[in-house]
């Protein structure tokens, strides 16, 4: 890592520390900008990564997309270009050097606007691979990121300058080695664009069964083509994608409500409570009741720490 990048990351770390202050995920006055601070490496967490750029300035993290592992640190950044269910784990953090991270969410329209303004050519027929990638970070991107974060010191400037700095950051990603992968999510007619429509349908209707032929119609593809491109983009099949969304939502509901696991199983779309319990255990390591008990104990320990 160059001395120039190192100095910028130190400045960014100080800014994130100042505006987070304590462990957890933190919203900011800049729309779609979030900070995370953790004093210790934590066990795996399950969730959906929205389209976003993630930069670590201290620590290290692993993200598991299906069976594919992405590891990133201050030397690089991670981008998810569509909604993706993942398992993530901070693997390097300490009270002396806490994990500090920056996340900037974006939309397809924001990417499309940059492609048009910058006259970046994107091939709608090009087949890209994963909708998640890790790429080396450079000083020009960090400069733009620091300018965006510094706006928190001058809130009156945020409405005018934040959109400009955000455009610059996303432009840097589009100019990077995986820019084509990001651009595909916004180009109407591209394979990723059409798979994104299918993902959106599954996300909004995760509790409903579906026919693969109906998903293929949404994507304007044959069934075999849908399977191939969906797996290229998400690293999983449509059924596996839906299962992860169902189980993540079931876990959230069980943690938020004192409700019977069988009732939750039906609410998220399972017809068989026993099948739900088996698949839940396979994903989270314990049956629903034991897993929720463990999570609540951990939450209590953190609250009392």
Image (cartoon, helix red, strand yellow):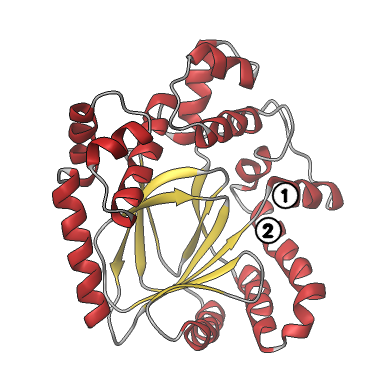
Q: Residue 111's mark?
A: 1
Q: Is residue 164 left or right of residue 29?
A: right
How many badges with numbers are in the image? 2
Q: Is residue 63 left or right of residue 155?
A: left
Compared to residue 15, the image places residue 169 above or below, namely above
At 32% from the left edge and 28% from the top edge, which residue is drawn? 270
Compared to residue 51, the image places residue 23 above or below, namely below
At 56% from the left edge and 58% from the top edge, which residue is drawn? 53
Q: Earlier in the sequence, mark 1 or mark 2?
A: 1
At 78% from the left edge and 68% from the top edge, which residue is drawn? 164
Residue 171 location, x and y as percent?
72, 57
- Between residue 209 and residue 79, name the one nearer to us: 209
Say if mark 1 contacts mark 2, CB within 8 Å: yes
Disc 2 secondary structure class: helix
Q: Which residue is mark 2?
A: 170
Dividing the image into 4 quarters, which one contains the C terminus?
A: bottom left
Residue 292 location, x and y as percent?
21, 54
Disc 1 secondary structure class: helix
- Between residue 110 and residue 171, name the one nearer to us: 110
Binning the other alpha carbons within 10 Å of mark 2 as few (below 14), some (14 to 19) or many (20 upward) gives many
- Between residue 142 and residue 95, name the one nearer to us: 95
How far apart marks 1 and 2 lie (CA) works out to 7 Å
Residue 166 location, x and y as percent?
71, 65
């Amino acid at each position: 890592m160059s001395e120039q990048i190192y100095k910028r990351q130190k400045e960014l770390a100080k800014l994130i520390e100042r505006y987070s202050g304590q462990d957890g995920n933190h919203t900011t006055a800049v729309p779609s900008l979030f900070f995370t601070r953790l004093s210790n490496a934590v066990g795996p967490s399950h969730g959906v990564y929205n389209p976003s750029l993630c930069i670590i300035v201290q620590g290290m993290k692993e993200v598991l997309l299906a069976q594919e592992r992405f590891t990133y640190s201050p030397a690089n950044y991670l981008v998810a270009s569509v909604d993706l269910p993942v398992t993530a784990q901070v693997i390097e953090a300490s009270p002396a050097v806490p994990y500090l991270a920056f996340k900037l969410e974006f939309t397809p329209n924001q990417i499309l606007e940059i492609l048009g303004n910058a006259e970046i050519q994107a091939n709608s027929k090009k087949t890209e691979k994963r909708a998640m990638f890790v790429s080396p970070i450079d000083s020009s991107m960090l400069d733009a990121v620091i300018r965006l974060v510094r706006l928190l010191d001058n809130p009156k400037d945020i409405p005018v300058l934040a959109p400009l700095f955000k455009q610059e950051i996303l432009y840097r990603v589009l100019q990077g080695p995986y820019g084509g992968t990001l651009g595909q999510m916004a180009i109407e007619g591209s394979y990723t664009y059409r798979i994104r429509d299918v993902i959106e349908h599954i996300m909004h209707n995760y509790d409903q069964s579906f026919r693969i032929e109906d998903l293929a119609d949404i994507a304007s593809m044959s069934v075999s083509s849908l399977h191939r491109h969906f797996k290229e983009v998400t690293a999983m099949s449509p059924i596996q994608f839906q299962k992860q969304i169902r189980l993540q939502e079931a876990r959230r509901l069980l943690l938020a409500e004192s409700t019977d696991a069988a009732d939750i199983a039906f609410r998220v779309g399972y017809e068989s409570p026993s099948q739900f319990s088996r698949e839940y255990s396979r994903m989270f390591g314990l049956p629903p009741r034991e897993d929720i008990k463990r999570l609540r104990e951990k939450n209590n320990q953190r609250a009392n720490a």
